[in-house]
Image (tube, rainbow, N blue to C red):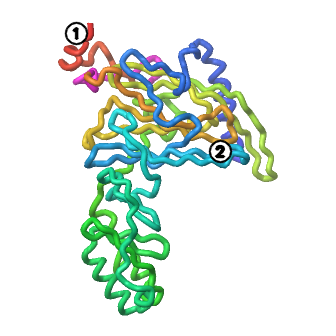
Protein backbone atom coordinates (compact mmCIF):
# COMPACT_ATOMS: atom_id res chain seq x y z
CA UNK A 1 0.00 0.00 0.00
CA UNK A 2 2.84 2.39 0.85
CA UNK A 3 4.40 1.79 -2.60
CA UNK A 4 1.07 2.58 -4.30
CA UNK A 5 0.76 5.83 -2.39
CA UNK A 6 4.33 6.88 -3.18
CA UNK A 7 3.96 6.18 -6.91
CA UNK A 8 0.66 8.07 -7.02
CA UNK A 9 2.13 11.05 -5.17
CA UNK A 10 5.12 11.10 -7.52
CA UNK A 11 2.97 11.05 -10.67
CA UNK A 12 0.68 13.82 -9.44
CA UNK A 13 3.66 15.89 -8.32
CA UNK A 14 5.06 15.55 -11.84
CA UNK A 15 1.81 16.76 -13.36
CA UNK A 16 1.64 19.72 -10.98
CA UNK A 17 5.30 20.47 -11.68
CA UNK A 18 4.49 20.69 -15.37
CA UNK A 19 1.55 23.02 -14.69
CA UNK A 20 3.86 25.36 -12.79
CA UNK A 21 6.47 25.42 -15.57
CA UNK A 22 4.50 27.02 -18.37
CA UNK A 23 7.18 29.71 -18.82
CA UNK A 24 9.51 27.10 -20.34
CA UNK A 25 9.89 27.37 -24.10
CA UNK A 26 9.36 23.75 -25.07
CA UNK A 27 10.11 24.41 -28.74
CA UNK A 28 13.81 24.68 -27.82
CA UNK A 29 13.86 21.00 -26.80
CA UNK A 30 14.42 18.53 -29.64
CA UNK A 31 14.81 14.76 -29.82
CA UNK A 32 18.37 13.72 -30.51
CA UNK A 33 17.68 12.58 -34.08
CA UNK A 34 16.22 16.02 -34.86
CA UNK A 35 18.66 18.17 -32.89
CA UNK A 36 20.89 20.68 -34.71
CA UNK A 37 23.45 20.99 -31.90
CA UNK A 38 24.71 24.27 -30.47
CA UNK A 39 27.24 26.98 -31.24
CA UNK A 40 30.27 24.83 -30.44
CA UNK A 41 28.90 21.27 -30.55
CA UNK A 42 27.20 19.00 -33.05
CA UNK A 43 25.01 15.95 -32.40
CA UNK A 44 25.77 13.06 -34.75
CA UNK A 45 23.86 9.79 -35.10
CA UNK A 46 25.95 6.65 -34.63
CA UNK A 47 23.17 4.05 -34.40
CA UNK A 48 19.70 4.80 -35.85
CA UNK A 49 16.57 5.13 -33.75
CA UNK A 50 15.18 1.67 -34.56
CA UNK A 51 18.32 -0.04 -33.20
CA UNK A 52 19.57 -0.64 -29.70
CA UNK A 53 23.13 -0.26 -28.44
CA UNK A 54 24.89 -2.45 -25.89
CA UNK A 55 28.32 -3.46 -24.52
CA UNK A 56 30.06 -0.10 -24.69
CA UNK A 57 33.81 -0.83 -24.42
CA UNK A 58 37.07 0.98 -25.12
CA UNK A 59 40.24 -0.64 -26.46
CA UNK A 60 43.01 0.67 -24.21
CA UNK A 61 45.66 -0.10 -26.85
CA UNK A 62 44.17 1.07 -30.15
CA UNK A 63 42.07 3.78 -28.41
CA UNK A 64 39.02 2.67 -30.37
CA UNK A 65 35.50 2.31 -29.01
CA UNK A 66 33.38 -0.80 -29.64
CA UNK A 67 29.62 -1.03 -29.29
CA UNK A 68 26.98 -3.54 -30.37
CA UNK A 69 24.15 -2.37 -32.62
CA UNK A 70 21.16 -4.66 -32.93
CA UNK A 71 17.62 -4.50 -34.22
CA UNK A 72 14.72 -6.50 -32.83
CA UNK A 73 11.59 -6.23 -35.00
CA UNK A 74 8.52 -5.06 -33.08
CA UNK A 75 6.17 -6.85 -35.47
CA UNK A 76 6.02 -10.65 -35.56
CA UNK A 77 5.62 -10.39 -39.32
CA UNK A 78 9.12 -9.01 -39.63
CA UNK A 79 11.83 -11.57 -39.07
CA UNK A 80 14.92 -9.65 -40.15
CA UNK A 81 17.60 -9.19 -37.48
CA UNK A 82 20.45 -6.74 -37.54
CA UNK A 83 23.44 -7.33 -35.30
CA UNK A 84 26.80 -5.59 -35.78
CA UNK A 85 29.71 -4.55 -33.66
CA UNK A 86 30.90 -1.06 -34.56
CA UNK A 87 34.45 0.23 -34.25
CA UNK A 88 34.43 3.96 -33.47
CA UNK A 89 37.16 6.52 -32.99
CA UNK A 90 37.19 8.77 -29.94
CA UNK A 91 34.99 11.34 -31.71
CA UNK A 92 32.32 8.72 -32.42
CA UNK A 93 33.03 8.33 -36.13
CA UNK A 94 32.34 4.77 -37.33
CA UNK A 95 35.54 3.27 -38.76
CA UNK A 96 34.17 -0.16 -39.68
CA UNK A 97 31.82 -2.99 -38.68
CA UNK A 98 32.74 -6.48 -37.58
CA UNK A 99 31.77 -9.51 -35.56
CA UNK A 100 29.03 -9.28 -32.97
CA UNK A 101 30.31 -12.23 -30.96
CA UNK A 102 31.18 -12.05 -27.26
CA UNK A 103 34.20 -9.83 -26.66
CA UNK A 104 36.71 -11.14 -24.12
CA UNK A 105 38.80 -8.77 -22.01
CA UNK A 106 41.92 -9.45 -24.09
CA UNK A 107 40.15 -8.34 -27.28
CA UNK A 108 39.33 -11.80 -28.67
CA UNK A 109 35.95 -12.15 -30.37
CA UNK A 110 34.72 -15.42 -28.87
CA UNK A 111 32.20 -17.91 -30.19
CA UNK A 112 31.79 -21.52 -29.03
CA UNK A 113 32.71 -22.68 -32.54
CA UNK A 114 35.44 -20.20 -33.51
CA UNK A 115 37.31 -17.05 -32.50
CA UNK A 116 38.45 -13.90 -34.32
CA UNK A 117 41.20 -11.32 -33.82
CA UNK A 118 39.28 -8.55 -35.60
CA UNK A 119 39.39 -6.21 -32.60
CA UNK A 120 43.09 -6.89 -32.01
CA UNK A 121 44.49 -6.59 -35.54
CA UNK A 122 41.59 -6.16 -37.99
CA UNK A 123 41.76 -9.78 -39.20
CA UNK A 124 38.23 -11.07 -39.84
CA UNK A 125 39.32 -14.72 -40.23
CA UNK A 126 37.31 -17.15 -38.13
CA UNK A 127 39.81 -19.47 -36.50
CA UNK A 128 38.93 -22.93 -35.23
CA UNK A 129 40.01 -23.95 -31.74
CA UNK A 130 42.88 -26.42 -31.49
CA UNK A 131 42.04 -29.76 -29.84
CA UNK A 132 45.07 -31.75 -28.68
CA UNK A 133 43.20 -34.83 -27.52
CA UNK A 134 41.02 -37.28 -29.39
CA UNK A 135 37.44 -37.86 -28.21
CA UNK A 136 38.55 -41.06 -26.53
CA UNK A 137 41.42 -39.31 -24.73
CA UNK A 138 39.14 -36.48 -23.62
CA UNK A 139 37.07 -39.04 -21.74
CA UNK A 140 40.13 -40.48 -19.98
CA UNK A 141 40.41 -38.66 -16.57
CA UNK A 142 44.21 -39.01 -16.30
CA UNK A 143 44.99 -37.89 -19.83
CA UNK A 144 42.43 -35.11 -19.59
CA UNK A 145 43.88 -33.75 -16.33
CA UNK A 146 47.43 -33.98 -17.62
CA UNK A 147 46.56 -31.97 -20.73
CA UNK A 148 44.47 -29.52 -18.73
CA UNK A 149 47.34 -28.74 -16.33
CA UNK A 150 49.74 -28.31 -19.23
CA UNK A 151 47.46 -25.85 -21.02
CA UNK A 152 46.48 -24.05 -17.82
CA UNK A 153 50.13 -23.47 -16.86
CA UNK A 154 51.13 -22.17 -20.29
CA UNK A 155 48.07 -20.03 -20.93
CA UNK A 156 47.83 -16.28 -20.42
CA UNK A 157 44.04 -16.34 -20.59
CA UNK A 158 41.58 -19.09 -19.58
CA UNK A 159 37.89 -18.73 -20.36
CA UNK A 160 35.19 -21.15 -19.23
CA UNK A 161 31.85 -21.47 -20.97
CA UNK A 162 29.17 -24.00 -20.08
CA UNK A 163 30.90 -27.37 -20.57
CA UNK A 164 34.20 -26.29 -22.12
CA UNK A 165 37.52 -24.61 -21.30
CA UNK A 166 39.33 -22.29 -23.70
CA UNK A 167 43.05 -21.58 -23.29
CA UNK A 168 45.10 -18.83 -24.95
CA UNK A 169 48.71 -19.93 -25.43
CA UNK A 170 51.06 -17.71 -27.48
CA UNK A 171 48.17 -16.01 -29.33
CA UNK A 172 46.51 -19.33 -30.26
CA UNK A 173 43.38 -20.72 -28.67
CA UNK A 174 42.86 -24.31 -27.51
CA UNK A 175 39.65 -25.97 -26.43
CA UNK A 176 39.10 -28.78 -23.94
CA UNK A 177 35.59 -30.06 -23.15
CA UNK A 178 34.67 -30.93 -19.59
CA UNK A 179 35.58 -34.30 -18.17
CA UNK A 180 32.91 -34.79 -15.51
CA UNK A 181 35.00 -37.39 -13.70
CA UNK A 182 37.45 -34.61 -12.83
CA UNK A 183 35.39 -31.44 -12.78
CA UNK A 184 33.66 -30.33 -9.58
CA UNK A 185 32.94 -27.00 -7.88
CA UNK A 186 36.23 -27.00 -5.98
CA UNK A 187 38.18 -27.65 -9.21
CA UNK A 188 36.46 -24.81 -11.07
CA UNK A 189 36.23 -22.19 -8.34
CA UNK A 190 39.32 -22.80 -6.21
CA UNK A 191 41.97 -25.07 -7.73
CA UNK A 192 41.89 -23.71 -11.30
CA UNK A 193 39.96 -20.44 -11.55
CA UNK A 194 39.65 -18.75 -14.91
CA UNK A 195 42.37 -16.32 -15.99
CA UNK A 196 40.55 -13.25 -17.22
CA UNK A 197 42.22 -10.44 -15.30
CA UNK A 198 45.85 -10.84 -16.36
CA UNK A 199 45.62 -9.77 -19.99
CA UNK A 200 43.06 -6.96 -19.95
CA UNK A 201 42.76 -4.87 -23.08
CA UNK A 202 39.06 -4.06 -23.23
CA UNK A 203 37.48 -1.89 -20.53
CA UNK A 204 33.73 -1.58 -20.14
CA UNK A 205 32.71 2.03 -19.59
CA UNK A 206 30.41 3.06 -16.78
CA UNK A 207 27.11 4.81 -17.34
CA UNK A 208 27.43 8.39 -16.04
CA UNK A 209 23.71 9.19 -16.05
CA UNK A 210 22.36 10.11 -12.61
CA UNK A 211 20.58 7.38 -10.69
CA UNK A 212 17.88 9.79 -9.56
CA UNK A 213 16.35 12.66 -11.51
CA UNK A 214 14.08 13.77 -8.66
CA UNK A 215 14.83 15.26 -5.27
CA UNK A 216 16.24 18.41 -3.75
CA UNK A 217 18.44 20.33 -6.24
CA UNK A 218 21.42 20.36 -3.88
CA UNK A 219 21.29 16.55 -3.60
CA UNK A 220 21.25 15.79 -7.34
CA UNK A 221 24.27 15.35 -9.60
CA UNK A 222 23.43 17.71 -12.46
CA UNK A 223 26.88 18.51 -13.85
CA UNK A 224 26.14 16.56 -17.07
CA UNK A 225 22.37 16.46 -17.39
CA UNK A 226 19.38 17.90 -15.56
CA UNK A 227 15.64 17.38 -15.70
CA UNK A 228 13.88 20.62 -16.50
CA UNK A 229 10.35 19.32 -16.75
CA UNK A 230 8.18 16.27 -17.38
CA UNK A 231 4.89 16.27 -19.31
CA UNK A 232 2.64 13.26 -18.79
CA UNK A 233 0.76 12.19 -21.92
CA UNK A 234 -0.23 8.70 -20.82
CA UNK A 235 -1.76 7.69 -17.50
CA UNK A 236 -3.14 4.32 -16.47
CA UNK A 237 -4.48 2.78 -13.29
CA UNK A 238 -3.35 -0.83 -13.01
CA UNK A 239 -5.38 -3.17 -10.80
CA UNK A 240 -3.95 -6.66 -10.32
CA UNK A 241 -5.63 -7.63 -7.10
CA UNK A 242 -3.22 -6.86 -4.28
CA UNK A 243 -0.85 -5.17 -6.71
CA UNK A 244 -2.46 -1.83 -7.55
CA UNK A 245 -0.55 1.12 -8.91
CA UNK A 246 -0.71 4.10 -11.24
CA UNK A 247 1.57 4.43 -14.23
CA UNK A 248 2.55 7.43 -16.32
CA UNK A 249 4.61 8.04 -19.45
CA UNK A 250 5.39 11.23 -21.30
CA UNK A 251 7.99 13.71 -22.44
CA UNK A 252 11.13 14.45 -20.46
CA UNK A 253 12.68 17.86 -21.06
CA UNK A 254 16.39 17.77 -20.28
CA UNK A 255 19.43 20.04 -20.42
CA UNK A 256 22.88 18.66 -21.25
CA UNK A 257 25.86 20.77 -20.19
CA UNK A 258 29.09 20.85 -22.21
CA UNK A 259 32.53 22.08 -21.04
CA UNK A 260 32.64 25.30 -23.11
CA UNK A 261 29.40 26.44 -21.50
CA UNK A 262 26.94 25.35 -24.20
CA UNK A 263 23.58 24.02 -23.04
CA UNK A 264 21.85 21.52 -25.31
CA UNK A 265 18.12 21.12 -24.73
CA UNK A 266 16.79 17.69 -25.60
CA UNK A 267 13.54 15.83 -25.06
CA UNK A 268 12.82 12.15 -24.66
CA UNK A 269 9.64 10.08 -24.41
CA UNK A 270 9.81 7.62 -21.52
CA UNK A 271 8.12 6.47 -18.34
CA UNK A 272 7.80 8.83 -15.38
CA UNK A 273 10.65 7.23 -13.40
CA UNK A 274 13.57 7.51 -15.79
CA UNK A 275 14.29 9.01 -19.24
CA UNK A 276 16.29 5.86 -19.98
CA UNK A 277 19.35 7.61 -21.33
CA UNK A 278 22.85 6.31 -20.74
CA UNK A 279 25.79 8.73 -20.85
CA UNK A 280 29.40 7.77 -21.55
CA UNK A 281 32.68 9.66 -21.66
CA UNK A 282 35.99 8.09 -22.68
CA UNK A 283 38.53 8.76 -19.88
CA UNK A 284 41.58 10.77 -20.90
CA UNK A 285 43.75 7.84 -19.75
CA UNK A 286 42.34 5.90 -22.72
CA UNK A 287 42.70 8.76 -25.20
CA UNK A 288 39.29 10.32 -24.69
CA UNK A 289 38.20 13.95 -24.47
CA UNK A 290 35.92 15.39 -21.83
CA UNK A 291 34.04 17.39 -24.47
CA UNK A 292 32.85 14.27 -26.30
CA UNK A 293 29.72 12.73 -24.79
CA UNK A 294 28.06 9.53 -26.03
CA UNK A 295 24.32 9.09 -25.42
CA UNK A 296 22.54 5.73 -25.69
CA UNK A 297 18.74 5.50 -25.69
CA UNK A 298 16.90 2.40 -24.50
CA UNK A 299 13.66 1.77 -26.40
CA UNK A 300 10.64 -0.14 -25.12
CA UNK A 301 8.07 -1.81 -27.34
CA UNK A 302 5.09 -0.58 -25.31
CA UNK A 303 5.81 3.07 -26.18
CA UNK A 304 5.53 3.83 -29.87
CA UNK A 305 6.97 7.30 -29.29
CA UNK A 306 10.08 5.98 -27.54
CA UNK A 307 13.04 5.45 -29.82
CA UNK A 308 16.46 3.82 -29.52
CA UNK A 309 19.72 4.75 -31.14
CA UNK A 310 23.08 6.13 -30.11
CA UNK A 311 24.48 9.62 -30.57
CA UNK A 312 27.63 11.57 -29.90
CA UNK A 313 27.87 15.20 -28.86
CA UNK A 314 31.26 16.45 -30.04
CA UNK A 315 33.08 19.69 -30.92
CA UNK A 316 32.31 21.23 -34.29
CA UNK A 317 35.94 22.39 -34.30
CA UNK A 318 38.27 19.52 -33.26
CA UNK A 319 40.91 22.13 -32.39
CA UNK A 320 38.80 23.83 -29.75
CA UNK A 321 39.98 23.42 -26.14
CA UNK A 322 38.22 20.79 -24.10
CA UNK A 323 37.35 23.16 -21.30
CA UNK A 324 36.70 26.85 -20.85
CA UNK A 325 37.91 27.41 -17.30
CA UNK A 326 41.15 26.61 -15.54
CA UNK A 327 39.69 27.68 -12.22
CA UNK A 328 35.99 27.22 -11.49
CA UNK A 329 34.05 28.94 -8.73
CA UNK A 330 30.54 27.66 -8.09
CA UNK A 331 27.48 29.39 -6.68
CA UNK A 332 23.86 28.56 -5.95
CA UNK A 333 21.22 30.00 -8.25
CA UNK A 334 17.72 31.07 -7.24
CA UNK A 335 16.57 27.44 -7.35
CA UNK A 336 19.33 26.24 -5.04
CA UNK A 337 21.22 24.52 -7.86
CA UNK A 338 25.02 24.47 -8.05
CA UNK A 339 26.15 26.44 -11.12
CA UNK A 340 29.36 28.01 -12.42
CA UNK A 341 29.99 31.62 -11.38
CA UNK A 342 31.19 33.07 -14.70
CA UNK A 343 32.35 36.32 -13.10
CA UNK A 344 34.64 34.70 -10.51
CA UNK A 345 35.77 31.68 -12.54
CA UNK A 346 39.02 32.03 -14.50
CA UNK A 347 39.17 31.20 -18.20
CA UNK A 348 42.22 29.30 -19.48
CA UNK A 349 44.77 30.96 -21.77
CA UNK A 350 44.12 28.21 -24.32
CA UNK A 351 40.44 29.07 -24.43
CA UNK A 352 41.09 32.79 -24.67
CA UNK A 353 43.49 32.29 -27.60
CA UNK A 354 41.08 29.96 -29.40
CA UNK A 355 38.23 32.41 -28.92
CA UNK A 356 40.29 35.26 -30.39
CA UNK A 357 41.33 33.16 -33.42
CA UNK A 358 37.71 32.27 -34.14
CA UNK A 359 36.70 35.89 -34.60
Q: Is residue 69 left or right of residue 3?
A: left
- What secondary structure do most residues of the magenta stretch adopt? loop
Above or below, comparing residue 271 to residue 315 in the picture: below
Q: Is residue 180 left or right of residue 74?
A: left
Q: Position of residue 280 (x, y in %)?
A: 41, 39
Q: Is residue 160 left or right of residue 282?
A: right
Q: What residue would you read off at disc 2?
A: 73
State the separation of the CA atoms marked 1 and 2.
Answer: 51 Å
* Label 1: how many Cα within 10 Å (few below 14, some 14–19, many 20+): few
Q: Position of residue 237 (x, y in %)?
A: 78, 39
In the depicted view, which residue is nearer to us: 10 or 132? 132
Could you say which disc has been placed on residue 356 in the image? 1
Q: Residue at x 29, y 24 (%)?
A: 318
Q: If the image is split into quadrants, where does the C terminus sit?
A: top left
Instruction: Answer with the quarter of the image where residue 293 lies.
Output: top left
Could you say which disc has been placed on residue 13 in the image? none
Instruction: Answer with the quarter of the image where residue 34 lies.
Output: top right
Q: Earlier in the sequence, mark 1 or mark 2?
A: 2
Disc 2 is placed on an element classified as: loop
Highlighted range, magenta:
320-337
Q: Is residue 134 magenta?
A: no
In the depicted view, which residue is nearer to us: 283 or 18? 283
Tell us which disc is closer to us: 1 or 2: 2
Amino acid sequence: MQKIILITILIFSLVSCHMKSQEIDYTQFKELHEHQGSKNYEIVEIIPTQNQASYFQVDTISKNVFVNSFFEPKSKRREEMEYDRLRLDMFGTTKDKGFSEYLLKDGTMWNSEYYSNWVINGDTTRHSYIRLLSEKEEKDPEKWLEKFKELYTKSTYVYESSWEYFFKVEKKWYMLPYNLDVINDNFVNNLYPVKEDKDIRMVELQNLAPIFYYGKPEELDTHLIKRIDYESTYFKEVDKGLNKYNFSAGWWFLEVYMPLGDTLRIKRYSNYEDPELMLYEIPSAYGGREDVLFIVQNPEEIFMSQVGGMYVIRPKDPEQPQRRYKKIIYKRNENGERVIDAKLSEESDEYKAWKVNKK
